Image (cartoon, rainbow, N blue to C red):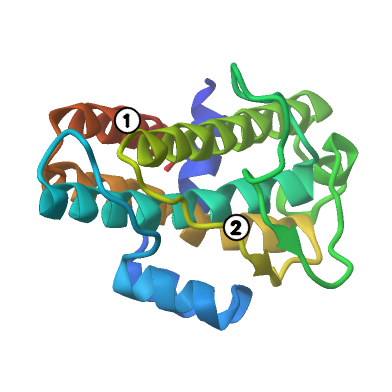
Amino acid sequence: MSVLKHELLEQYFAKDSRRKFLALVSRVAGAGSVGLLAEGQSGSGTSTGTSGTSAANDINILNYALSLEFLEATFWTQFLGQGALPAGVSSFSGLIGTVSGNPPAFTSASFSGASAFAGYPAAFTNGLFGLLGQIRDHEVAHAAAIISAIKSLGGTPTQPCTYTFPVTSVNDLLTTAQTIEATGVSAFDGAINLFSNPALIQTAATIATVEGRHA
């Protein structure tokens, strides 16, 4: 990645606080989703592996993380279009939510014409659009991985929500993404040491590493 691209991404994907994220969610998600994010729990189930209490706690943490991944995956898929399905997954159903209103869908040409990139060559904006597409694919894959982990514990994955994103331009897209993506880093960093199941610690650490690259 060029130094210029790295600096630009740092500008738009700077880390932010969980408080600011929840304030944003109160605007873009339904009340049920806001409650889930604030309380950090959803779904239910019992595990045949670890103790029932530990498994239930792990499932609640995973469902909290899943709600964040749904938000991220839906956000990027809406504005960049669908990308590649994760390995072993045959449909986007259950991996992304729906978006209300009449939100725009952006292309690489949209980025070239955005005021944020005035004066930048098309090669740069095309490359940036492709990089954001990779982030989208990562978020969808993360959602699929967490769903699989919840089911393996005997739990019930929470479901995607209907969102209303305050985005009408590429500039809006990047400003909103600043908060959404940065939260993925802190969420998984904070969750790593809360799991009882060692395998989940590894999964969370892997996702946190990828989220860190996004931020």
Instruction: Determine contact: label 2, label 1, CB under 8 Å.
Output: no
- The answer to which quarter of the image holds residue 162 is bottom right
For disc 1, the neighbor class at 10 Å (few under 14, some 14 to 19, many from 20) is few
| Residue type indicated by callout 2 | Pro
The residue closer to the viewer here, 152 or 97, is: 152
The residue closer to the viewer here, 85 or 110, is: 85
Relative to 68, say whether 193 is above or below: above
Q: Is residue 24 in sight in this rendering?
A: no
Identified at 32% across, 30% down, the residue is: 209
State which quarter of the image contains the C terminus.
top left
| Residue type indicated by callout 1 | Thr
Relative to 118, say whether 87 is above or below: above
Q: In the figure, is residue 136 to the left or right of 23?
A: right
Q: In the figure, is residue 145 to the left or right of 191?
A: right
Report the disc number at residue 54: none
Residue 42 lies, in percent from the top left, at 38, 64
Identified at 19% across, 55% down, the residue is: 57
Gap between marks 2 and 1, in whole Å?
23 Å
Report the disc number at residue 160: 2
At mark 1, the secondary structure is: helix
Q: In the figure, is residue 142 to the left or right of 132?
A: left
The residue closer to the viewer here, 135 or 112, is: 135
